Amino acid sequence: MMVNPADTTISGALADATERALREAEIRLPPDVLAVLRRATAAERDAIARQELGNILENIALAEERQVPICQDTGVPVVYLTLPPDIGLSPGLFEGVREGVRRATAAIPLRPNVVDPLTRENTNDNTGAGMPAVHVTPGDRLTVTVLPKGAGSENVSRIGMLLPSQAAEIPRFVAETMLLAGGKPCPPVILGVGIGGTFDVAAALAKEALLLPVDTMDDYEQELCDAVNALGIGPMGLGGDTTALSVKVKRAGCHTASLPVAVNVQCWASRRATVEVKR
Ligand code: SF4
């Protein structure tokens, strides 16, 4: 096999950047996520819910102090790359990401979560067929963004192929997703909502929405968030005002006869980090 030396260099730099991004994401929550958690704690009226939110904030502070992962479920890595025009898509880029995941798994360490879906055999390094999922978009710099995704919240995510006449029912669909989930996804949650596209695009949009800053919401996102908080599920499912910290929406055009809606549920441990790859 012919190996391009430049490709090898980028692959190595990408491995370093992926490992660094995973370390950052696993140990420290982004400032906007911390801000909404603190805001919710100050506003919560239920004493037990306030105590639960306090426990979460203490957990976050201890993880940073001890430089250990925020949660025992360190998730599966979902990776987003931006590629500048002078870097072509090559196998070396994907291998760089995989190597970064393997190194992070051993060094941080991360729980080896990736298994074969049917035999359940564990690869022990958080890589596997098609894993980590790597999404590539054009950009002006080479960056790697990681979003480690825990199973408790991923398992209660949902997609619905609504009819075009059901647009007004989207808030009910989103709230119903959390009603079915209850305390399983370790609320308070952040919801990524993908509206439009196709079956697969809606799901991808919902996950991408989790990369958006969560400390601001537009009117529609606030309406969805209010609908979820009206359920009263509360932190860890023990009741209270705070079921969702934020709802973020991404949209795409869709078929005139379709209205796909996907809800990607994210727990309070909404981990993400971006590192620019130095070349
Ligand atoms: S849902 Fe989130 S907080 Fe709960 S165990 Fe999984 S990763 Fe941890």
Image (tube, rainbow, N blue to C red):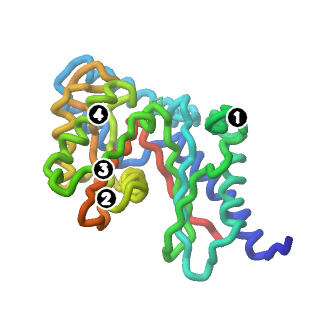
**Label 4 to label 2: alpha-carbon separation:** 19 Å
**Residue nearest the observer in this picture, 203 or 187:** 203
Position of residue 214 measured from the top left corner of the image (x, y, whole percent): 31, 50
- The residue to which callout 4 is attached is 178
The answer to whether the residues at label 4 and label 3 have Cβ atoms under 8 Å apart is no
Displayed quadrant of residue 83: bottom right
The numbered mark, 2 or 3, whose residue comes first in the sequence reads 3
Circle 1 sits on which residue?
122
Which type of secondary structure does the marked residue at label 1 adopt?
A: loop
User: How far is disc 4 from disc 1 in space, using C-alphas?
Assistant: 30 Å
Q: Earlier in the sequence, mark 4 or mark 3?
A: 3
Q: Residues within 10 Å of mark 4 (few under 14, many from 20)?
A: many
Question: Left of 141 or right of it: where is 155?
Answer: left
Dot 3 amino acid type: Met
- Tell me the number on the disc at residue 10: none
Position of residue 261 measured from the top left corner of the image (x, y, whole percent): 30, 51
Q: Tell me which amino acid carries mark 2.
A: Lys
The answer to whether the residue labelled 1 contacts the one labelled 3, judged by CB atoms less than 8 Å apart, is no
Instruction: Classify mark 1: residues with Cα within 10 Å, few (<14), some (14-19) or many (20+).
Output: some
Please provide percent x and percent y for residue 116. Answer: 66, 38
Q: Quadrant of the N terminus?
A: bottom right
Residue displayed at 74% across by 72% down? 7
Residue 161 - label: 3
| 154 on left or right of 131 | left
Return the mark for residue 250: 2
Residue nearest the observer in this picture, 197 or 103: 197
Q: Mark 2 vs mark 3: give the one in front.
A: 3
State the residue at coordinates (38%, 39%).
157
